[in-house]
Image (cartoon, rainbow, N blue to C red):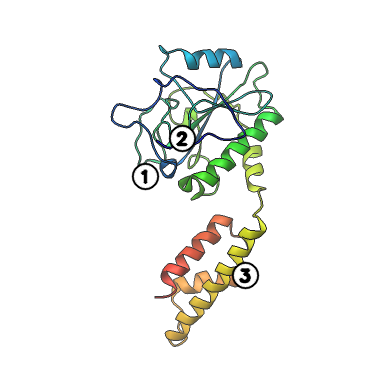
Amino acid sequence: MTATWLEFCVRLDGPREKQGYPSIADRTLAQIEGEVDHSTEGPLTAALGELQKLTRQASWHFTVPKSGPPLQHYPLESIAWHTGLPGDRSIDTSLIGNLTLIGIEHVDWPDDTLNDNQLYWSVELTKTFRLLCPQVAAHPPTLRVNLWEHNWLSSTSCPSGLIPWPKKLAALEEEEMTPEERQWFSDQLASVVTQIKQRIDEQGGVRDTQAEAILTKLNEGGAGLTEDEVKQAVKDALAEGTG
């Protein structure tokens, strides 16, 4: 199994016995579809004690402490036991289950709040998942799509309102494209416009509905489109625009 350990995290291995299932030992980065944000419901030492306890059928990939960087207990490819539901690998099940999701515990003790350090590292983890896992990046950061709370999947109060989703989502949306990415999008958009116009010319100037819609959006310079919507417009045009 390929093992992905994040360089900015402190490695603190969990028990090897507390991962996977008899028929499914691990997964690939391409099979990861999102994350589940948890609260430890107690201090860091207690949470780490529970992680190491072999009689406790619970494990997770990361713990975000009150100070310092995250602790990583298992590689991303490991199947940890953090949602309480076996789930499956299908996208159609809305990413439910241990098999497709990354588990992140956030220390809530003693004040039941996520401090600035924790919010920063929680956002950095999500950004990194989006870089490494194509199915996570296939959608914008979205609640109940690639961002989950434990209580949305299992009968539990966790994370007990700990995660400030508006702040986390805003921080994720503030991430700007690199100059290289901007150039790539510019080149792709220029190519798309050319191909759609060529398709229209080949049809004697008659625009079909899809070509019309995509061309209108692209002529507006992508106004109002998210990065992922632009990507999808590019993919649609490249697939359909050349007929």
Residue toward you, 114 or 134? 134
Q: Position of residue 38 (x, y in %)?
A: 53, 26
Q: Position of residue 101 (x, y in %)?
A: 45, 35
Position of the C terminus by quadrant:
bottom left
Label 3 crowd (10 A; few <14 / some 14-19 / many >=20)? few
On screen, residue 147 versus residue 123, left or right, reads: left
Name the residue that disc number 3 marks: 220
Q: Residue at x 63, y 59 (%)?
A: 180
Is label 3 or label 2 in front? Answer: 2
Which circle's residue, 1 or 3, is located before the other in the chain?
A: 1
Given the current orientation, which residue lies at the most extreme right position? Answer: 116
Q: Which mark is residue 3?
A: 2
Q: Mark 1 to mark 3: distance in Å?
A: 33 Å
SS type, badge 3? loop
Q: Amino acid at mark 3?
A: Glu
Which circle's residue, 1 or 2, is located before the other in the chain?
A: 2
Q: Amino acid at mark 1?
A: Asp
On screen, residue 218 versus residue 170, left or right, reads: left
Name the residue that disc number 1 marks: 92
Q: Residue at x 36, y 45 (%)?
A: 92
Q: Position of residue 45 (x, y in %)?
A: 59, 13
